């Protein structure tokens, strides 16, 4: 009996999404399965906005960035419609059955895994693929999108060396990754950054300045600082932990409000922390400092060969699971294999950089400052 596969892409776009869509579609076609795309993440299946995917629409998309289906960060249970939040879970269940789906394939990051689990708990057959440039999805060695972003950020650091040594400047480059440091750590090492700052290792600005001054004393009067967008100073980290604890254990409304105000104030301070770091380093070292925020460049353009290969492998493995009717899983990359992992073990968890990770040791070993010692 012909199986009907629904597919959607959710969360931030990333290179490799179209390669994964193509792989699921082409693998399914060889088993005479029908594949139906839903537009713009979970909103598409909530509003039944479908896009037929056939040989024609899947042709030529292996190398294109973004997602032909569109994406969004909409959550099934909290979807903004007409200016109000609605729980659209039942509408999704209804459209799943109205389209006679046998399975819904969701391509996304950590948030998507959580949303997919919710739909699984409503009785839908779900399979997810791990996508994000942040590489912070639990239970998979790597996510597609990461390798391409790693290359973009590394190329940027290479290029920023030109102006750093020509103008004897500190160049700070902010790298994406949300609350994880994988992209900054990987590209910082690959690009030879002199300082790498990570969310997982709160930094001391004086130690960063000291590392840069030591380089200048050895005649290297320029430095490259690769900072993950989620990085925090030790002071900020301690103040945040203190305010969080105060909020959690507050006994009066006044104390709870005071703690919440403090958390809001800290979040506001954090918004331009990279620009602030630039001003501070210039004052502390006497070296001209400039800041580059890579932002969405890291999510754009054609996927790397590694991401195309990974996305194609995971998409193909997804169809094998559909044939076996093995649902409620994420197709994880594990030692070059693609293995099913129960969604319950993935959803709600993040994979952050362990402070003793081999890459951290490697960075320290080649003399990179992580702002903590
Ligand atoms: O999750 C991918 C990511 O690019 C993060 O690195 C970044 O913090 C976030 O998305 C930006 O979100 P948005 O695309 O909604 O601005």
Image: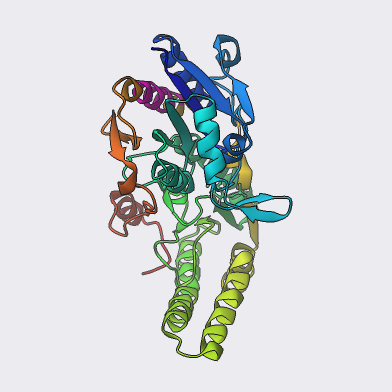
**Which residue is at a point 29% across and 39% down the rendered structure image?**
341
Q: Position of residue 278 (x, y in %)?
A: 61, 65
Q: Position of residue 373 (x, y in %)?
A: 36, 69
Nearest the camera: 131 or 184?
Answer: 131
- Report if residue 315 lies within the magenta region: yes
Above or below, 319 against 373 in this view is: above
Q: Quadrant of residue 155?
A: top right
Q: Position of residue 13 (x, y in %)?
A: 57, 38
Q: Which residues are magenta?
A: 308-319
Q: Quadrant of residue 204?
A: bottom left
**Coloring scheme of the render?**
rainbow
- Report if residue 192 lies within the magenta region: no
Q: Quadrant of residue 180?
A: bottom left
Nearest the camera: 144 or 259?
Answer: 259
**Which residue is at a point 32% across and 47% down the rendered structure image?**
344
Check the picture and name the quadrant holding the N terminus: top left
**Which residue is at a point 59% across and 75% down the rendered structure image?**
264
Q: Report how many numbered discs are placed on residues in the image.
A: 0
Please state if 43 lies on the left or on the right of 200 as rendered.
right
Residue 318 seen in the figure: yes
Above or below, 337 against 133 in this view is: above
Above or below, 311 against 29 in this view is: below
Q: Position of residue 303 (x, y in %)?
A: 52, 28
Above or below, 9 against 293 in this view is: above
């Amino acid at each position: 009996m012909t199986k009907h596969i629904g597919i959607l892409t959710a969360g931030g776009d990333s290179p490799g999404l179209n390669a994964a869509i193509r792989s699921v579609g082409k693998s399914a076609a060889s088993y005479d399965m029908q594949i139906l795309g839903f537009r713009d993440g979970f909103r598409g299946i909530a509003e039944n906005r479908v896009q037929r995917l056939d040989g024609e629409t899947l042709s030529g998309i292996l190398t294109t960035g973004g997602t032909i289906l569109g994406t969004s960060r909409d959550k099934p249970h909290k979807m903004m419609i007409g200016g109000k939040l609605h729980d659209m879970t039942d509408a999704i269940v209804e459209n799943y059955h109205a389209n006679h789906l046998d399975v819904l394939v969701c391509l996304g990051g950590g948030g998507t895994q959580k949303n997919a689990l919710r739909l699984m708990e409503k009785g839908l057959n779900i399979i997810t693929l791990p996508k994000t440039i942040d590489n912070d999805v639990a239970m998979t060695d790597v996510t597609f999108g990461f390798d391409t972003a790693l290359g973009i950020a590394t190329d940027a650091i290479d290029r920023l060396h030109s102006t750093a040594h020509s103008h004897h400047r500190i160049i700070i480059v902010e790298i994406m990754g949300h609350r994880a440091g994988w992209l900054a750590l990987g590209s910082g090492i690959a690009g030879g950054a002199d300082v790498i700052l990570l969310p997982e290792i709160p930094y001391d600005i004086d130690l960063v300045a000291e590392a840069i001054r030591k380089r200048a004393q050895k005649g290297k009067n320029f430095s490259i600082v690769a900072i993950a967008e989620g990085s925090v100073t030790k002071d900020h980290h301690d103040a945040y932990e203190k305010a969080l604890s105060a909020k959690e254990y507050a006994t009066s409304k006044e104390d709870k409000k005071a703690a919440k105000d403090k958390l809001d104030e800290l979040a506001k301070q954090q918004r331009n922390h990279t620009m602030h770091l630039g001003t501070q380093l210039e004052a502390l070292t006497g070296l001209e400092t400039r800041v580059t925020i890579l932002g969405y460049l890291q999510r754009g353009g054609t996927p790397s060969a590694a991401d195309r290969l990974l996305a194609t492998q995971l998409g193909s493995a997804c169809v094998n699971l559909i044939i076996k009717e093995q649902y409620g899983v994420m197709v994880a990359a594990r030692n070059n294999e693609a293995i099913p992992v129960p969604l319950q073990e993935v959803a709600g968890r993040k994979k952050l950089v362990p402070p003793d990770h081999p890459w951290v040791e490697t960075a320290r070993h080649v003399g990179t400052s992580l702002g903590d010692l």
